[in-house]
Each structure stands twice: as structure tokens, then as C-alpha cells.
Image (spheres, helix red, strand yellow):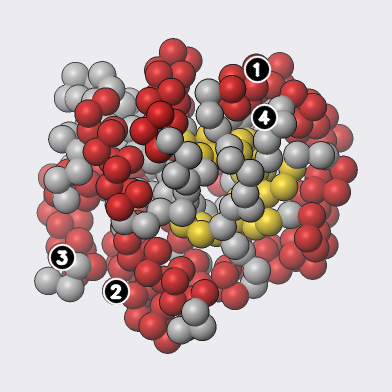
Amino acid sequence: MKTSLSGIYPIVNTPFHPDGSIDYESQDRLVDHLLEQGAHGLGLFGNASEGYTLSGQERIQLMRRISARVNGRVPLVASSGHTGTDAAVELSRELQDLGADCLMVLPPYFLKTDGEGLLHYFGAISKAVQIPIMVQDAPLMTQVAMPAPLLARMGREIEHVKYVKVEAPATAPKISALARLAGDSLTLFGGLNCQFFIEEWQRGARGQMPGSDRTRDLVEIWNHLEAGRTREAWAVFNRILPLLRFELQPGLGVSAQKHNLVAAGVIASAHVRHPTAALEPESVAELAHLRALADGL
């Protein structure tokens, strides 16, 4: 699928049975649900997917299953970053061959490298694939800073680097800086669960990559913005903002999203794999209250 990515690309959660094994039937229902909710594409194996807990074989099985189920209806963006360059190259090539339309790539975050090292890392991946690369700029998670001039240089000099997912606070000013420096060489996406969705769109972001639990609302916001209905976009955003804020608590967002998906009847269990943190009963009750507010109940 050759297309310019834009819109709402939820990061697909990975449902687990209470014993920790993958619940493939719930995974199928979640994929169908996200497409029914209007997702413009899907993100796979990101932080909200608990991709860091998946084995290599599980990742292959999920990629095959999700790609077959989607069957080209929307683009698939698969996370293929790694702590080693050669491993990232191998994983990127593998996910491309299994049906990914774009690769979302974290920089090396265990042994950190400098700007030239980052150019080498992303350049090596680019030489090995034929699909676009989305650089994931997420220093809160990786502790790797990628300044706007460096990212703009990647867009100019590395063939397949076409996108940046900006998760480096303050995100809106960084999107402005990147839009100014990179011009048409990069398309910008927002992350961090859409906390500055509207400001980022106003500054040039062409997509968002949130969790999987409020896709219909976020697609509605997107449609309002694209149609020039800013007041209506803010009204929907403000209704769901307390829930988005709750999910931005470090380490707890994935569990919260899964509880919301269980409540919606989409997945069977909110189980998360260690070291992902599970909500305690008090937080589950608080979440239910915020979910009711977001639903206008």
C-alpha cells in the first residue's frame, strides 16, 4: 500500500489471557473494532501494544494475523526499533516482508549514540527496506534527544525517512520548528495520547497515534478539524480530556486502556504483562467515573 499517512492511527493493544498468553480472538475483535470506529490506519508493537514484552515469534504471529485481517483496508505502521543496529535492520526487513506499510523506529536507547550515530542507525535501516520510516522522537521513554535540526537532516539525507512522531515535550513548538526546518521532506505525527492534539494539528501535524480506547472520539475531532470546525473539535476534546489525562500517568495508561476496552466488550481481559503496571481497585473505580463522563453519562 503506497499512500501518504494521515489521520488517527491508534496503537493496537495486545490482549492477553489472565495466564499471560496472547488472546488472539480478542485481538481480532479489537482490530475489527478500530476499523469500525473509523481508524485511518493502525500502529503495531508500540508502547501501548506492550511490544517490549513480546517474543520475536509472537511478533511474527501477530503481524501475520493482523495483516491478513486488515487485508489492505488501512495502512499498518509497525514498530521495529531495537537496541542494536543490525537487529533493527533485521526486524525492519522482517516486518516489511510480513505486511507493514511503514516502520516506526525508536533510536537505540540502551547504549546511546550521538547525532552521527543516529544518522548511521536510521540510514542502515533505510538501505535495507523499501517502505517509509517514521522516526519516533520519544525522549521521555528513551532518554535520547533528537533536536529538530537533526530530524530535519534525516528527512533530507536518508531516503526512506518520511515521518516523525513527535513525543518530545513541548510537542507543539517542536512541530512548528520541524515544519519550518524540514518543509515537505517530513510529515509530522503527534503522540503522547493526543494531549495536545489540536495545537499540534494547527501547527502542521498530519496525524496522531493514541491508544486504542477512544478512537471514535479522536476520529470525530480529526474530522471537525479537517472541516474547519474548530469549536466543535474543542468540545469533543474537552469531554474526553479527563480520561486522556488519567491515561497519561506514567506506567498506567496501558492498563487503563485495556480496562476501557473490556468495559466496551471488545477484549476479554485487562491483563498486562510484567513489567507493565496494572491498575489497583481504587484506580479502576476512578477510571470508570471518568469513562462515564467521557461518554456523557
CA gap, disc 3 and disc 1: 44 Å
Identify residue for label 1: 90
Gap between marks 1 and 4, in whole Å? 14 Å
Q: As displayed, is residue 82 above or below residue 137?
A: above
Dot 4 corresponds to which residue?
A: 108
**Depth order, front residue of 106/268:** 268
Asked whether residue 131 appears in the rendered view, the answer is yes
Looking at the rendering, in which quadrant would you find the N terminus? Answer: top right
Q: Residue furthest top?
A: 57
What residue would you read off at disc 2? 239
Q: Amino acid at mark 1?
A: Glu
Label 1, residues with CA under 10 Å away: few <14, some 14-19, many ≥20: some
Q: Amino acid at mark 4?
A: Pro
Q: Residue at x 19, y 67 (%)?
A: 295
Find the distance from the CA under tag 3 to the CA under tag 2.
10 Å
Q: Single out the mark in the foreground, 1 or 4.
A: 1
| Image location of residue 63, percent across then percent down | 45, 26
Q: Nearer the viewer, mark 2 or mark 4?
A: 2
Q: Which residue is mark 3?
A: 292
Marks 3 and 4 sit apart, C-alpha to C-alpha, by 40 Å
First in sequence: mark 1 vs mark 4: 1
The x and y percentages for residue 224 are 44, 77
Query: Which mark lies nearer to you, 2 or 1?
Result: 1
Query: Crowding at label 3, few (<14), some or many (≥20) Cα neighbours within 10 Å?
Result: few
Write the residue at 44% across / 71% down. Answer: 223
**N-term mark: 2 or 1:** 1
